[in-house]
Image (cartoon, grey):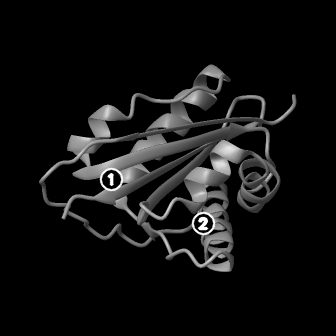
Amino acid sequence: MPARLGTVVIGLALAAALLVVPAPAQAATPAQDYARAAVKATNKVRANRDRATLRVDRCLRKAAVRQAKVMAGKSNIFHQVLGPLLDGCALTVVGENVAYGFASGTEVVKTGWMKSPGHRRNILDKRFTRVGIAARQSDDGVWYVAQVFGKPAS
Protein backbone atom coordinates (compact mmCIF):
# COMPACT_ATOMS: atom_id res chain seq x y z
CA MET A 1 0.00 0.00 0.00
CA PRO A 2 1.54 3.38 -0.98
CA ALA A 3 1.93 6.14 1.62
CA ARG A 4 -0.68 8.91 1.49
CA LEU A 5 -0.90 12.43 2.91
CA GLY A 6 -3.54 15.04 3.74
CA THR A 7 -3.49 18.62 5.14
CA VAL A 8 -5.93 21.32 6.28
CA VAL A 9 -5.78 24.61 8.27
CA ILE A 10 -8.53 26.79 9.71
CA GLY A 11 -8.37 29.85 11.93
CA LEU A 12 -10.63 31.97 14.12
CA ALA A 13 -9.99 34.51 16.86
CA LEU A 14 -11.09 33.37 20.32
CA ALA A 15 -10.59 34.52 23.90
CA ALA A 16 -10.16 31.53 26.21
CA ALA A 17 -7.64 29.88 28.55
CA LEU A 18 -5.66 26.69 27.93
CA LEU A 19 -5.36 24.09 30.66
CA VAL A 20 -2.37 21.75 30.32
CA VAL A 21 -2.08 18.83 32.72
CA PRO A 22 1.04 16.62 32.69
CA ALA A 23 0.46 12.98 31.75
CA PRO A 24 1.48 10.26 34.22
CA ALA A 25 4.74 8.44 33.47
CA GLN A 26 4.41 5.04 31.79
CA ALA A 27 6.36 2.67 29.58
CA ALA A 28 6.50 3.80 25.95
CA THR A 29 4.57 1.86 23.31
CA PRO A 30 5.59 1.64 19.64
CA ALA A 31 2.88 4.20 18.85
CA GLN A 32 4.29 6.61 21.45
CA ASP A 33 7.81 6.08 20.09
CA TYR A 34 6.51 6.82 16.57
CA ALA A 35 4.82 10.03 17.76
CA ARG A 36 7.88 11.18 19.75
CA ALA A 37 10.10 10.67 16.71
CA ALA A 38 7.66 12.69 14.59
CA VAL A 39 7.64 15.55 17.13
CA LYS A 40 11.44 15.51 17.23
CA ALA A 41 11.74 15.48 13.42
CA THR A 42 9.14 18.27 13.12
CA ASN A 43 11.00 20.48 15.57
CA LYS A 44 14.31 19.72 13.89
CA VAL A 45 13.09 20.94 10.50
CA ARG A 46 11.52 23.99 12.16
CA ALA A 47 14.81 24.81 13.92
CA ASN A 48 16.71 24.45 10.64
CA ARG A 49 14.42 27.11 9.17
CA ASP A 50 14.48 29.52 12.15
CA ARG A 51 11.06 28.55 13.48
CA ALA A 52 10.19 28.24 17.16
CA THR A 53 10.02 24.80 18.74
CA LEU A 54 6.48 23.42 18.99
CA ARG A 55 5.39 22.33 22.46
CA VAL A 56 3.39 19.14 22.76
CA ASP A 57 -0.12 20.05 23.89
CA ARG A 58 -2.32 17.59 25.73
CA CYS A 59 -5.55 18.69 24.06
CA LEU A 60 -4.03 18.55 20.55
CA ARG A 61 -2.45 15.18 21.30
CA LYS A 62 -5.84 13.87 22.42
CA ALA A 63 -7.35 15.05 19.12
CA ALA A 64 -4.49 13.42 17.19
CA VAL A 65 -4.92 10.13 19.06
CA ARG A 66 -8.64 10.10 18.37
CA GLN A 67 -8.06 10.78 14.64
CA ALA A 68 -5.25 8.22 14.26
CA LYS A 69 -7.40 5.55 15.96
CA VAL A 70 -10.39 6.24 13.71
CA MET A 71 -8.29 6.23 10.53
CA ALA A 72 -6.51 3.00 11.53
CA GLY A 73 -9.83 1.39 12.49
CA LYS A 74 -11.30 2.23 9.08
CA SER A 75 -8.02 1.67 7.18
CA ASN A 76 -8.71 5.00 5.52
CA ILE A 77 -7.09 8.44 5.59
CA PHE A 78 -9.21 11.57 6.08
CA HIS A 79 -9.28 14.80 8.10
CA GLN A 80 -11.25 15.35 11.24
CA VAL A 81 -13.50 18.38 11.61
CA LEU A 82 -11.14 20.93 13.15
CA GLY A 83 -13.59 23.72 14.04
CA PRO A 84 -14.55 22.20 17.41
CA LEU A 85 -10.87 22.20 18.44
CA LEU A 86 -10.80 26.00 18.30
CA ASP A 87 -13.16 26.17 21.29
CA GLY A 88 -12.37 22.76 22.80
CA CYS A 89 -8.62 23.41 22.98
CA ALA A 90 -8.92 27.22 23.31
CA LEU A 91 -7.07 28.00 20.06
CA THR A 92 -6.95 30.90 17.62
CA VAL A 93 -5.75 28.77 14.69
CA VAL A 94 -5.62 25.03 14.07
CA GLY A 95 -4.22 22.81 11.32
CA GLU A 96 -3.74 19.14 10.62
CA ASN A 97 -1.51 16.83 8.62
CA VAL A 98 -2.51 13.19 8.18
CA ALA A 99 -0.68 10.31 6.55
CA TYR A 100 -0.46 6.55 6.34
CA GLY A 101 2.01 3.96 5.20
CA PHE A 102 5.20 5.50 6.62
CA ALA A 103 7.34 3.17 8.75
CA SER A 104 8.48 5.73 11.36
CA GLY A 105 7.80 9.16 12.78
CA THR A 106 11.00 10.47 11.23
CA GLU A 107 10.06 9.08 7.81
CA VAL A 108 6.55 10.55 7.80
CA VAL A 109 8.01 14.02 8.45
CA LYS A 110 11.09 13.87 6.19
CA THR A 111 9.89 11.82 3.22
CA GLY A 112 6.19 12.49 3.50
CA TRP A 113 5.08 15.84 4.86
CA MET A 114 8.21 17.91 4.13
CA LYS A 115 8.10 16.89 0.45
CA SER A 116 4.53 18.10 0.09
CA PRO A 117 3.95 21.88 -0.17
CA GLY A 118 0.76 21.95 1.92
CA HIS A 119 2.13 19.73 4.69
CA ARG A 120 5.44 21.57 4.75
CA ARG A 121 3.52 24.85 5.02
CA ASN A 122 1.74 23.54 8.15
CA ILE A 123 4.97 22.30 9.72
CA LEU A 124 6.75 25.61 9.09
CA ASP A 125 3.79 27.91 9.85
CA LYS A 126 5.03 30.55 12.32
CA ARG A 127 1.56 30.92 13.81
CA PHE A 128 1.66 27.43 15.29
CA THR A 129 3.21 27.07 18.74
CA ARG A 130 1.71 23.75 19.87
CA VAL A 131 1.41 20.28 18.37
CA GLY A 132 -0.11 16.89 19.10
CA ILE A 133 0.94 13.83 17.11
CA ALA A 134 -0.36 10.29 17.30
CA ALA A 135 0.12 7.11 15.30
CA ARG A 136 -1.88 3.90 15.32
CA GLN A 137 -1.59 0.70 13.31
CA SER A 138 -4.46 -0.84 11.41
CA ASP A 139 -5.18 -4.56 11.73
CA ASP A 140 -2.87 -5.19 8.77
CA GLY A 141 0.02 -3.30 10.44
CA VAL A 142 -0.13 -0.06 8.42
CA TRP A 143 0.64 3.11 10.40
CA TYR A 144 -1.92 5.95 10.34
CA VAL A 145 -0.72 9.30 11.65
CA ALA A 146 -2.37 12.57 12.66
CA GLN A 147 -0.40 15.75 13.39
CA VAL A 148 -2.57 18.53 14.85
CA PHE A 149 -1.18 22.08 15.19
CA GLY A 150 -2.50 25.05 17.10
CA LYS A 151 -1.91 28.38 18.73
CA PRO A 152 -3.53 28.99 22.10
CA ALA A 153 -5.73 32.03 22.59
CA SER A 154 -3.90 34.70 24.61
Q: Which of marks 2 and 1 is nearer the N terminus?
A: 2
| Residue 68 as seen in the image, left or right of residue 9 | right
Q: Say which residue label 2 marks.
A: 36
| Residue 135 as seen in the image, left or right of residue 3 | left
Residue 33 found in image quarter: bottom right
Q: Which residue does the image show at 40% across and 43% down from the upper left?
A: 63
Q: Which structural element holds mark 1?
A: helix
- The numbered dot on residue 21 is none
- The numbered dot on residue 59 is 1
Q: Which residue does the image show at 12% across and 53% down from the upper left?
A: 15
Q: What residue type is labelled 2?
A: Arg
Looking at the rendering, in which quadrant would you find the C terminus?
bottom left
**Badge 2 density bin: few <14, some 14–19, many ≥20, Cα 10 Å:** many
Q: Which residue does the image show at 66% across and 22% down from the upper left?
A: 76
Q: Compared to 36, does 104 lie above or below?
A: above
Q: Which residue does the image show at 81% across and 36% down from the upper left?
A: 3
Q: Position of residue 44 (x, y in %)?
A: 66, 75
Q: What residue type is labelled 1?
A: Cys
Q: Which structural element holds mark 2?
A: helix
Q: Position of residue 146 (x, y in %)?
A: 56, 43
**Badge 1 density bin: few <14, some 14–19, many ≥20, Cα 10 Å:** many
